[in-house]
Image (tube, rainbow, N blue to C red):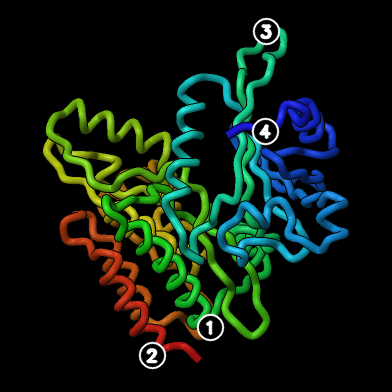
Amino acid sequence: MGCSFSGLNALYDAVNGGGDVWINDNRFRVVRQLGEGGFSYVFLVKEVLADSASASGGGSGLAKKVKDPSHLADDGTYAMKKVLIQNTEQLEMVREEIRVSSLFSHPNLLPLLDHAIISVKPTPGGSRNHEAYLLFPVHLDGTLLDNANAMKAKKEFFSTSDVLHIFRQLCAGLKHMHNLDPPYAHNDVKPGNIVLTHRKGQPPLAILMDFGSARPARRQIRSRSEALQLQEWASEHCSAPFRAPELWDCPSHADIDERTDIWSLGCTLYAIMYGLSPFEYALGESGGSLQLAIVNAQVKWPTGPKPKYPDALHQFVTWMLQPQAAVRPHIDDIVIHVDKLIAKFSN
């Protein structure tokens, strides 16, 4: 869970000022920062092989540790997430993210390759006492959100075929999670949590990431206090424009299940086409309410590419955006339907 003592100071200094980082027994050089958010930072790092490993042609330290060799980078580069942990609650959240990530093994879910949680001395007046380092494969083409913003600026759109193939991959990853025993919900499916890798002559590779909000999907709500607790949890862990109605206004007697993700998936299909959630228009309207738009499933369809997307895609989104979770489809139904659409509309 930690890294060797000799690497601790180097770990802290390297990530804050450039240099080498040790995660357990493996050494990485910090190349540059890729992004940041909240209490976390993401860096591009490159594995530094020991001279003995290089000379012998043997596998790197990481290669010996990672079960699936397809997760290893040919050039030794990876993404490293550094999390600043300031209290016990944050520490437990990181440990839970690590535990949950280890449950999944699917080509459309981003794998956690290695991790370390270390103790650090708090700075004067500070209370931070841990830092976590999580190592993942790197996807330098950015997130679906990054791509959508860049395409919007150029007035470009994904083809119908690419929309369906990107979406199909997300469904495959979610199906893996939903079919576990017990089923797990991702709880924060959105364009910012999907990385894309562009491939020549093929649709982009789409991978769902960030399992910090993932939890067992099925919860029985049997009191007003339980309903309010769920709403409070969702307000912290589920992005508002993609959050299901039952997480905004939970009844005092409700059975919550993995179909909260189906709502987010419907919003995400819309976003693959048009670059944003189907409810974000409410944020720009005078007197508009995002919550009301979501709870009432008030979708507005923008003008799209020419030729426009088929009506069948709009109907597909509407099918997923059922305000009543009990009549929303399950992931297996979604997969069957998207496969039919791919057969009909793919080039």
Q: Residue beneath label 1, please? A: 306
Residue drawn at (43%, 88%) of the image? 345
Q: Amino acid at mark 1?
A: Lys
Rounded to the nearest angstrom, the CA distance separating label 2 from label 4 is: 52 Å
Rounded to the nearest angstrom, the CA distance separating label 2 from label 1 is: 19 Å
Residue drawn at (81%, 55%) of the image? 53
SS for dot 3: loop
Rounded to the nearest angstrom, the CA distance separating label 1 from label 4 is: 54 Å
Rounded to the nearest angstrom, the CA distance separating label 1 from label 3 is: 58 Å
Q: Are marks 1 and 3 in contact (CB under 8 Å)?
A: no
Work out whether residue 13 can be spotted: yes
Q: Amino acid at mark 4?
A: Cys
First along the sequence among labels 3 and 2? 3
Q: Is residue 68 left or right of residue 80?
A: left
Q: Residue beneath label 4, please? A: 3
Q: Is residue 69 left or right of residue 5?
A: left
First along the sequence among labels 3 and 4? 4
Residue drawn at (50%, 67%) of the image? 272
SS for dot 4: loop
Rounded to the nearest angstrom, the CA distance separating label 3 from label 2 is: 62 Å
Q: Residue beneath label 2, please? A: 344
Q: Amino acid at mark 3?
A: Gly
Instruction: Give residue 125's mark.
Output: 3
